[in-house]
Amino acid sequence: MMKLILGSASRSRRQILSEMGYQFTVLSADIDEEIRIEKPEELVVALAHEKANAILTKMVKNGMMQDIVESQETTLLITADKVVIHDGVIRKKPTTSEGARKFIQGYSQSHASTIGSVLVTNMKSCVRMEGWDKSEVYFHKIPDEVIDSLIEEGSVFYVAGGLLVEHPLTSPLVESIVGTMDSVMGLPKELTEKLIKASLQES
């Protein structure tokens, strides 16, 4: 007896959670992602907690929590965050065309690492389970015309580092991935499954 809420507007995360065989509802929250934490592992975990806090606050204000607490079903809230590390620098979502172009051009020259967090909040027991995962992506040279098309389309502005490994234009240019595709896309399946099972034990 379990209900899942995915606290993310990310299409990639929705796709991955569906692939895992789960049915879920989607809620999202706008937060200030300018938290200044130097270690990327700590940063993505902190941001996942901030997202959970914002969603829970919204649910309380909307009167949605009482039914969840009183229900015989356990409701789990999944929040996540991801950053890209390139040449030792944390990259979040690009905000300008120039910034996106610089990001993508750089991936032809040296590999990118992704560090992503998953936080599962048991809304009945209030217990939270957290973890993070890391992958590396190596690209062949990314042609300028591909970069132009990605920027014009606009998808790069909605993902950390403008890194789109699953996009039809960039997937043929991926040389190798050390880790898993789902981790690079923002929701590592193995970690998510592990945290869901651990959270259910806290019901």
Image (cartoon, rainbow, N blue to C red):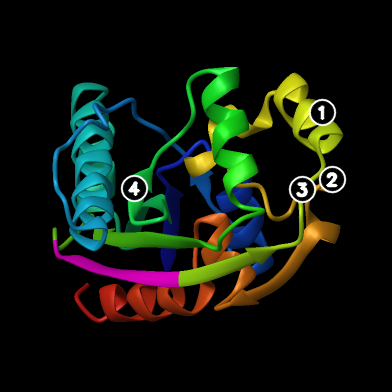
Q: Nearer the viewer, mark 3 or mark 4?
A: 3
Three-letter amino acid code of the residue under disc 4: Ile
Q: Nearer the viewer, mark 1 or mark 3?
A: 3
The answer to which of marks 1 and 3 sits earlier in the sequence is 3
**Dot 1, how many residues are within 10 Å of its Cα: few (below 14), some (14-19), or many (20+)?**
few
Give SS at disc 4: strand
Q: Main secondary structure of the magenta part?
A: strand
Q: Are marks 3 and 4 in contact (CB under 8 Å)?
A: no
The answer to which of marks 4 and 2 sits earlier in the sequence is 4
Disc ID at residue 149: 1
The answer to which of marks 1 and 4 sits earlier in the sequence is 4
Q: Are marks 1 and 2 in contact (CB under 8 Å)?
A: yes
Q: Could you tell me how far apart the alpha carbons at marks 3 and 4 are, in whole angstroms?
A: 21 Å
Q: Could you tell whether 15 is left or right of 123 in the image?
A: right
Residue at numbered disc 2? 169
Q: Which residues are magenta?
A: 127-134
The residue at the point 82 percent across, 28 percent down is: 149
Three-letter amino acid code of the residue under disc 2: Leu
Q: Could you tell me how far apart the alpha carbons at marks 4 and 2 are, in whole angstroms?
A: 24 Å
Q: Quadrant of residue 184?
A: bottom right
Residue at numbered disc 4? 90
